[in-house]
Image: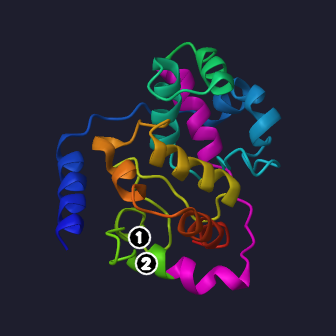
Amino acid sequence: MKKWLISASVVMALASGATQAVVGNPEDGKVKGAACAACHGADGNSPNPAWPKLAGQHPEYIQKQLMDFKAGVRKDPLMSAQAALLATPQDVANVAAYFSSQQQAPGQIKPEVVTLGEQIFRGGNLANGVPACAGCHGSTGMGNPLAKFPRISGQHADYLTKALKDFRVGTRANDLNGMMRGVVAHMSDAEIETVAQYLQGLAD
C-alpha cells in the first residue's frame, strides 16, 4: 500500500510540475525517422524481438528516451549514434509523433505463462516485495504519458526481458528516482521472463 501511495504521489507531482513537451509533426517525423526503420520497422513494429516496438508508444516516452540517448543518460552504442543524428528537440518530437501514430501489431502469448504472468503484473509478489506492474502502467499495460511511464502491452518479450534485467543490474539507470530499479531488484529471472511473456500478448 505504501509503495502504491508513493507511486501515486510521484504521478501527481509530475502532473502539477511537468513542462510542456514539444509537439511533433508525424509527416516530418516519417521522413526524419526513415533510418529508424532498419531496426524498428517502417511502421514502428520491429521485426526483431530484441528491438522494441515503437508503434503506438506514447510520444512523451519516445522523446524522453531519445533525449536520454543523446545526453548519454541512457547508453547503447547503436541508439546513441542514431539519436545524435536528430539535431534539435523538434526533430526528436517529430520522430516520436510519427511512431506514436502508428498501429502496434499484436503479440502472442504462451498459454502456460498466463496465470503467473498475470499475477505478477496485477498483484506483484508480496513475499519478496515486488509491486504490481499495473500500479504504474495501468490495468491494460498502456502506461501513463504524463508521467512518461511507457506502454508495455504488446511489446516484444525478448526486449522487455532485457530491459528489466538491465534495470536490475543497473546498466540502465534512466528511470525516475530509481523506481524501475527498485521494482525489479528482488525479481527472479523466471518472474521477469514470465511477466514479459504475459505482456507480449496483452492487448489494450
User: What is the three-letter code of the residue carrying label 1?
Assistant: Ala
Q: Is disc 2 in contact with disc 1, using a CB cutoff of under 8 Å?
A: yes
Residue hosting label 2:
122
Query: In terms of depth relative to the viewer, which is nearer, 26 or 193?
Result: 193
Identified at 62% across, 37% down, the residue is 26
| Most frequent secondary structure within the magenta stretch | helix
Is 186 rendered above or below residue 108?
Answer: above
> What's the magenta region?
89-118
User: What is the three-letter code of the residue carrying label 2?
Assistant: Arg
- Would residue 191 be counted in the magenta stretch? no
- Would residue 90 be counted in the magenta stretch? yes
**x and y percentages locating residue 95 in the rendered image:** 61, 32
Label 2: element kind = helix
Query: In terms of depth relative to the viewer, which is nearer, 95 or 80?
Result: 80
Label drawn at residue 101: none
**x and y percentages locating residue 35 in the rendered image:** 77, 26
Residue hosting label 1:
134
**Which quadrant would residue 194 be assigned to in this image?**
bottom right
Give the left or right position of residue 170, taking residue 156 as reference.
left
Identified at 45% across, 34% down, the residue is 64
Give the left or right position of residue 144, taking residue 103 as reference.
left
Identified at 47% across, 26% down, the residue is 67
Label 1: how many Cα within 10 Å (few below 14, some 14–19, many 20+): some
Give the left or right position of residue 41, taking residue 134 as reference.
right
Query: In terms of depth relative to the viewer, which is nearer, 54 or 185?
Result: 185
Give the left or right position of residue 5, taking residue 125 as reference.
left
**x and y percentages locating residue 94 in the rendered image:** 57, 30
Which quadrant would the C terminus be assigned to in this image? bottom right
Identified at 52% across, 57% down, the residue is 151
Q: What is the image's colouring?
A: rainbow
